[in-house]
Amino acid sequence: MPHPNRVQPDGSLATVPERGTMMGNRGVLHDEAGEIGPKRWAHRNWVCCTLVPRGKPRKILRPGRYTELFFLDEAVALAAGHRPCAECRRADYERWRGAWAEAFGTREGASAMDARLHAARAIPGARRLRHETGTAADLPDGSFFAQAGRAFLLTGGRALPYAPDGYGSAEALATGPVTILTNPVARAVLAGGYRPALHPSAVRRSSPPS
């Protein structure tokens, strides 16, 4: 039975049958019966992990253990406020730190990065994330924005409409104001050269329509 643990680009949780290609966590969000409550984070260490850490299948929503969250891909995870895990994705974590140094001038550790990310992404007590209004053309590749109730991934100067099972065909980049879903700290790291892992549908759909 699907659980409400599939993370959407705006940071909300949804119940969908597709598991996605990546996993992560924000702490313990479920109770002893495995039910996920209204809390949306329990600490600042929001990470994005491989789907099966260390190659070992696991039973999810175990009592007292962190709540497994799932993402279509890493671009969604970044939009939802997560960063690469330093344990199961060490090489990607170091790439992230390198792009962070390019963006902010210093190569920081996990605690410092998480504090800065949390200040940029979370509205204390609101159980939702901060979002800005801006222009899609000003965003770096790998960012998410929303317009008219639809979420889009920006890649290669095109907008890919998001769905829980993959991206739709590329569309012209939105004009006018949009809601920016990827927080400004993550956007700076993307602009600093970090390239998130994308769902296979992003590669298939990113070319302009004929």
Image (cartoon, rainbow, N blue to C red):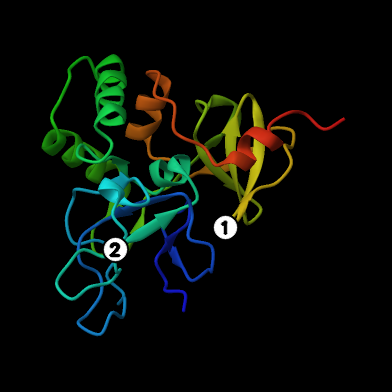
Marks 1 & 2, CB-CB < 8 Å contact: no
Q: Residue at x 36, y 26 (%)?
A: 188
Residue 174 appears in the rendering? no
Ranked by sequence position, the earlier of labels 1 and 2 is: 2
Q: Is residue 191 left or right of residue 31?
A: right
Asked if 175 appears above or below 54 in the picture, the reply is above
Q: Amino acid at mark 2?
A: Arg
> Seen in the image, is 117 located left or right of residue 206?
left
Reading the image, the residue beneath label 2 is 58
Q: Nearer the viewer, residue 149 or 87?
A: 87
- Residue topped by disc 1: 164
User: Residue at left 35%, top 26%?
Assistant: 189
Q: Three-letter amino acid code at disc 1?
A: Pro
Query: Seen from this angle, which residue lies furthest bottom?
Result: 33
Q: Secondary structure at mark 1?
A: loop
Residue 44 falls left or right of residue 49: left
Q: Position of residue 143 (x, y in %)?
A: 49, 35
Which quarter of the figure is the C terminus placed in? top right
